[in-house]
Amino acid sequence: MNARENFHAMMSGGRPGWMPLNVPVTPPVADEIEARTGVRNAELAFETDFGFEWVGYNEDPQRWRDALADVAGYVLPAKAEIGPFCIAHIEPPKGTVGKAYHFRTMLHPLEKITSVAQLEKLPWPDTSDPAHYAAVQARMQQVHTRGKVAFAGMECTTFEVSWYARGMDNLFQDLAEGNGVADWLLDWFTERSCHVGRAFARAGVDIIGLGDDVGMQTGMLLSVPMWRQHLKPRLAKVIAAIREASGGRKVWVHYHSDGDILPIVPELIEVGVDILNPVQPECMDAALLTRRHAKALGLSGMVGTQTTMPFGTPDDVRRRVREIAALHRDHGARVMIAPTHVLEPDVPFANLLALVEEAKALRFD
């Protein structure tokens, strides 16, 4: 079997040969991978199982700068970077973040917005334009040609991207006041995600990655009734768009949320989530999820990036990989192994190698 066939065997209840493996990394870790292997891409350097794709929008950032100043009186700092969805970052002063040169401070350019009328005057891109997605199918085919699982990333589906632009406190206040601003943003990003999801489904991807961080390590970030009112119907709408566009072909929906989101797991399954990620071991029990939902839900991640990967030994990493494999071997869980987030430069390279080597050494056939 190749990686794609193995993944579908795992997810369809067949007989996979191994746990599908993903190793997401930050740019400083990619630097080290390249220095040691001559290949920068972790998928290619370690022959992991997934090939990833995202959609970018080529928008002029000056349009946003001008519109924000004119509509909202918000002057973006000259050194700030701003994207097509009004999400902005600024690089910290040199020498303040050590090896983590990729870190950015997030700004919230819509924090001064007071009305829906102002939002409507801003230069939002037309995400229904097919031109944005013209090259997606060819890039997905390249992943399939390598025998890999084509994974289309759409994380920050609705909630996160809305508060990135508006500010979390402001977005929650909007919802409490019912002033329409938060609803407009959530609806706009929901429609954006429907357009992107349809394009990916039609392009032949295997997995579409949705997600919004709605959990903390002590529980939900927002109440379950609030999630149920504002976020669940919008997530359901995006998944329905993906299913409609897939034409009956199975596209696996992978949902990411950090933190402890156990209270909403049954409802995520209800709206069509197939795979839960990252199942943080610091606050989510993969064995419990297996006992409750093994027939309905695959699990992805489960190797802690707050604990095992940066602070454990290589033997600790290998032990955790074996524990995850046992969930499949002994209890029938459908598992994809990965760190619970991108690997930061505090992760010893020996631990990264231990993760890859142990995952590849464990075979089910």
Image (spheres, grey):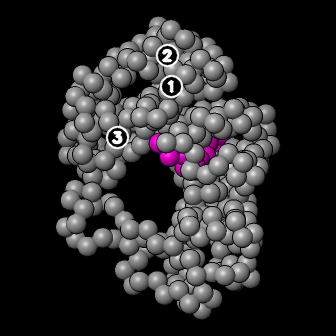
Q: Is residue 151 above or below residue 97?
A: above
Q: Is residue 93 above or below residue 19?
A: below
| Magenta residues (range) | 202-217
Q: Which residue is mark 3?
A: 306
Secondary element type, mark 2: helix
Q: Position of residue 149 (x, y in %)?
A: 53, 33
Structural distance between the alpha carbons of marks 2 and 3 = 22 Å
Contact? badges 2 and 1 (CB < 8 Å)? yes
Q: Which residue is mark 1?
A: 286
Lateral position of residue 277 relative to residue 194, left or right: left
Residue occupying image coordinates x 35% and y 39%: 305
Q: Position of residue 234 (x, y in %)?
A: 74, 52
Q: Earlier in the sequence, mark 3 or mark 1?
A: 1
Q: Amino acid at mark 3?
A: Gln
In this rendered view, identify the residue nearer to me: 240 or 264: 264
Q: Say the numbered circle drawn on residue 327.
A: 2
